[in-house]
């Protein structure tokens, strides 16, 4: 397979417009929106419901990771649009359940249910891009989607922080239910990107067996695992930062959103830069550089936190650098991984998404287990997994040179 093919496989007017990309970007944003919007409310929820609020993120990610592995083969079998419609219905039902919950346990249950539908958005958006484009062009288009979807993690914490100031955390989930309803109707405007002749002809049971083939595809898994390790670090920050910023450093909940948003601005900027970089550099070169930059910046943060030097700024600045690299790492890793498979892009996208977002389960469980009331737990988790993300790519290149 030509690793740097950048031609469009199939070009039709419904798939090249801003409206089409805007809908896909919104669907890609469902994961961020479903979690980021209530981050400022997590300390309040933990106090009011007398439970571990991190587990609400864990519950969502468990449902998100498992459901993608189910939806992937189904979408390869019947197309992309029908699973999207069903997913939005499940998301709305789960959001309403969260809004009406009266305990952490109830929210965790409905968050799992909510995730069963939310996962279809980003997973099938990636698959639709893979249906239409190859490698470098796909990385370019995915970077465009990241720029669009970045509105959610910027607006989410800001909006959630203001809502918790004037209302209760329940209202945040009611808002998610309304957004899910709006997205349900927007899907009517999406074309079906998987032609009948390209759909999996085998039975669904056979389609699920394809996962074993994907796990044995070492180039595919190398890119996927690098992205997975990086997202363990990302979710350690997403889940741990409300308590570090609000509880430890005393930042007001309504101001937390601004500190979170600057990282997303960095992601948007790097996504824009990535659109140009993929024209001049290989995806492997870009991934090696960005994962190394992320690992080194977090290493500096670890030293600063351990030495109690620099206060909150020695968390904000290194995190900004490492988090910004997501604008290149997510799109380039996904495009490179999907380029290593011939068919069953839905299943491949499901594996990527399941491991990428399921990685947050590791983060939240580590944070809950080793929480010590200081930023150190969050810091060492981020440091460990950014280093692993870079190591798996650099080891590959070292092996190639030795050969």
Image (cartoon, grey):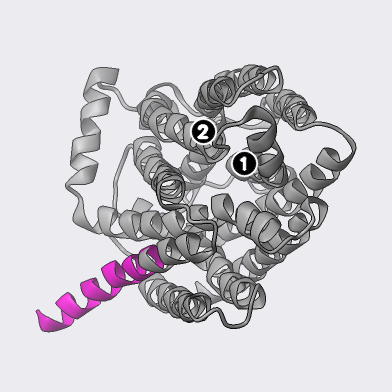
Residue 372 spot, x, y in % from top left: 48, 56
Q: Nearer the viewer, residue 250 or 86?
A: 250
Residue 60 numbered tag: 2
User: What secondary structure is marked by label 2?
Assistant: helix
Residue 262 found in image quarter: bottom right
Residue 398 spot, x, y in % from top left: 20, 80
The answer to whether residue 395 is left or right of residue 358 is left
Residue 174 spot, x, y in % from top left: 76, 25
The answer to whether residue 369 is left or right of residue 39 is left
Which residue appears at 22% of the width and 71% of the height?
Answer: 396
Which residue appears at 59% of the width and 72% of the height?
Answer: 315
Q: Which residue is mark 1?
A: 35
Residue 310 found in image quarter: bottom right
Q: Is residue 157 above or below residue 287?
A: above
CA–CA distance in space, label 2 to label 1: 8 Å
Q: Quadrant of the C terminus?
A: bottom left
Q: Main secondary structure of the magenta part?
A: helix
Which residue appears at 67% of the width and 47% of the height?
Answer: 21
Please indicate, yes or no, whether residue 38 appears anywhere in the rendered image. no
Q: Which residues are magenta?
A: 385-403
Q: Nearer the viewer, residue 193 or 360?
A: 360
Residue 15 numbered tag: none
Residue at the far right: name it: 166
Please indicate, yes or no, whether residue 323 appears anywhere in the rendered image. yes
Q: Is residue 396 covered in magenta?
A: yes
Q: Is residue 98 covered in magenta?
A: no
């Amino acid at each position: 397979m030509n690793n740097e093919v950048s031609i469009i496989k199939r070009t039709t007017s419904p798939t090249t417009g801003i409206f089409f990309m805007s809908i896909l970007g919104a669907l890609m944003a469902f994961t961020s929106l479903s979690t980021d919007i209530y981050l400022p409310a997590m300390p309040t929820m933990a106090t009011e419901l007398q439970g571990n609020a991190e587990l609400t993120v864990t519950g969502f990610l468990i449902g998100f990771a498992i459901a993608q592995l189910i939806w992937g083969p189904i979408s390869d079998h019947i197309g992309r649009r029908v699973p999207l419609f069903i997913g939005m219905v499940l998301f709305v039902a789960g959001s309403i359940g969260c809004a009406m919950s009266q305990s952490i346990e109830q929210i965790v249950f409905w968050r799992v249910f909510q995730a069963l539908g939310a996962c279809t958005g980003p997973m099938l958006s990636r698959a639709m891009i893979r249906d239409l484009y190859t490698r470098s062009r796909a990385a370019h288009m995915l970077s465009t989607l990241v720029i669009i979807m970045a509105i959610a993690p910027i607006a989410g914490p800001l909006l959630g922080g203001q809502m918790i100031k004037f209302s209760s955390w329940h209202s945040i989930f009611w808002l998610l239910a309304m957004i899910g309803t709006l997205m349900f109707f927007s899907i009517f405007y999406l074309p079906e990107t998987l032609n009948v002749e390209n759909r999996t002809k085998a039975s669904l049971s056979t389609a699920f067996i394809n996962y074993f083939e994907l796990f044995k595809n070492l180039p595919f898994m190398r890119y996927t695992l690098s992205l997975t390790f990086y997202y363990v670090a990302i979710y350690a920050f997403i889940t741990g930062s409300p308590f570090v910023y609000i509880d430890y450093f005393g930042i007001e909940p309504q101001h937390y959103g601004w500190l979170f948003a600057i990282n997303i601005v960095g992601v948007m900027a790097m996504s824009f830069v990535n659109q140009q970089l993929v024209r001049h550099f290989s995806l492997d070169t870009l991934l090696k550089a960005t994962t190394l930059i992320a690992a080194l910046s977090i290493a500096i943060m670890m030293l600063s936190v351990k030495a109690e030097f620099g206060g909150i700024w020695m968390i904000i600045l290194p995190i900004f650098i490492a988090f910004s690299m997501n604008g290149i790492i997510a799109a380039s890793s996904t495009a490179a991984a999907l380029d290593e498979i011939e068919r069953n892009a839905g299943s491949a996208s499901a594996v990527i998404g399941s491991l990428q977002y399921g990685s947050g389960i590791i983060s939240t469980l580590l944070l809950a287990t080793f929480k010590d009331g200081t930023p150190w737990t969050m810091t060492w988790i981020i440091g460990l997994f950014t280093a692993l993300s870079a190591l798996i790519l650099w080891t590959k290149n070292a092996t190639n040179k030795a050969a």
